[in-house]
Image: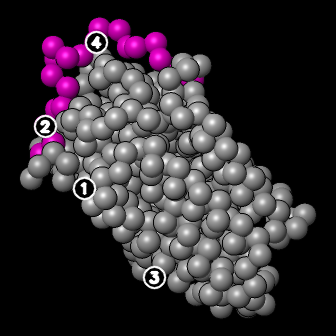
Amino acid sequence: MKPLSLLFLTLFNSILGLSVLFPILGPLARELGLSEVQVGLFSTGYALMQFILAAYWGRRSEVVGRKPILLMGILGFAASFFLFALFAWLGYQQVLSGWGLFACLLFSRLLGGAFSSATLPTAQAYLADITPREQRTQNFAVLGAAFGLGVIFGPAIGAGLAHFGLLVPVVFSASLALLNALFVGLALPESRRPLERTPTPPSLSWADPRIRPLLLIGLSINLASIAMEQTVAFLYQDRLGLTPAQTAQTVGLALVIFGIVGVLVQGFWVRTVRWPPRALLGLGLALLLLGYLGLVFAPSFAWLTASLVLLGLGSMATPGLTAAQSLAVSDDEQGVVAGLSSAAQALGRMLGPVVGTSLYGLSPAYPYVFSATLIGLALLFFLARPQLASQRE
């Protein structure tokens, strides 16, 4: 297999293992006597560790190579999920309970966030190593497709395995990560030869003018997306007057459509048209703006879902942004810029749930007004800087 195909499978397996947990975390926590706020802290803590450590792992991959950091991230993720399953089982056995149980489960999630933060930036840096600069936009779209497919299939697998017990999906995720590590160890070659490594990591930071505007745009895209994802089920239920069971089915169908559109756009369309990063980013931001405005006013299932389709089409902005970040720096700074980009995404995952749900409590339209405003400002900021993401491929 080609390194790109191997990397696709590596990232797909990693995202699949994480997203398997999505549909069972809430019910599992309730069976263990934990509150909704405590469940929210699991996700917030996970994202916090990614925000803190993603750039560190990117820098380390410049020094020791990509493959060791990928392996460390995947194995650490596996260990954290095994620990989570163990602590939850001890909760079922009444060995742990209350705040002691919560502290142990939170520790396992913090550990998972700390190590999983190595996977995405190192995969992006690996791809930059093996891809000529003129092909990076198309190949980064493959990573986006792997991410999207993992998010589509993971919750379905998690829901199916939950019929055998709520801890079964957790153990499955940990076992899948071990298999993924074995696959990486045996099949994936190192992309950064010893002579290409740097003894000290580059000093690239958020303040670097080459990437600061792109990181801010990335933060805006992710924050707007997470605020939408956290509240869109409430929006469908309230706008359409659905029962909880109808909401689950309706929103599930809409999100599958949304996910499939995103995968097709990134996995096939972006690779076919071969547009430069600036064109993808500009059109993607415009489509995202239309999608969020659509959610503000949509009165029916058809219009709500059409708005999600626009958001799926707008996901072309992601490979454009990732490629622009990669092309803005030297080959010795790929790991660092990928780590900073992952940290910006993690910051969006931390703030998005709080912002989205808080605004929804004030008015159902407010989270999407917020997202549209954020993307609109990002689009104006982007258009006002013709030199941004304008590197020729």
Judged by depth in the image, the label closer to the viewer, 3 or 2, is 2
For residue 52, above or below residue 78: above
Return the disc, 1 or 2, that comes first in the chain's sequence.
1
User: Which residue occupies 45% across, 57% down?
Assistant: 316
> Mark 1 or mark 3, which is nearer the start of the sequence?
1
Task: Specify whether residue 93 is in view.
Answer: no
Measure how far apart labels 4 and 1 are at the Cα level: 28 Å
Q: Depth check: 267 or 173 in front?
A: 267
Q: Which residue is mark 2?
A: 189
Residue type at mark 2: give it. Answer: Pro
Q: Are marks 3 and 4 in contact (CB under 8 Å)?
A: no
In reply to whether residue 246 is colored magenta, the answer given is no
The amino acid type of the residue labelled 1 equals: Leu
Precedes in sequence: disc 3 or disc 2: 3
Residue bearing mark 1 = 9
Tell me the residue that label 3 is attached to: 163
Span of residues in magenta? 187-206
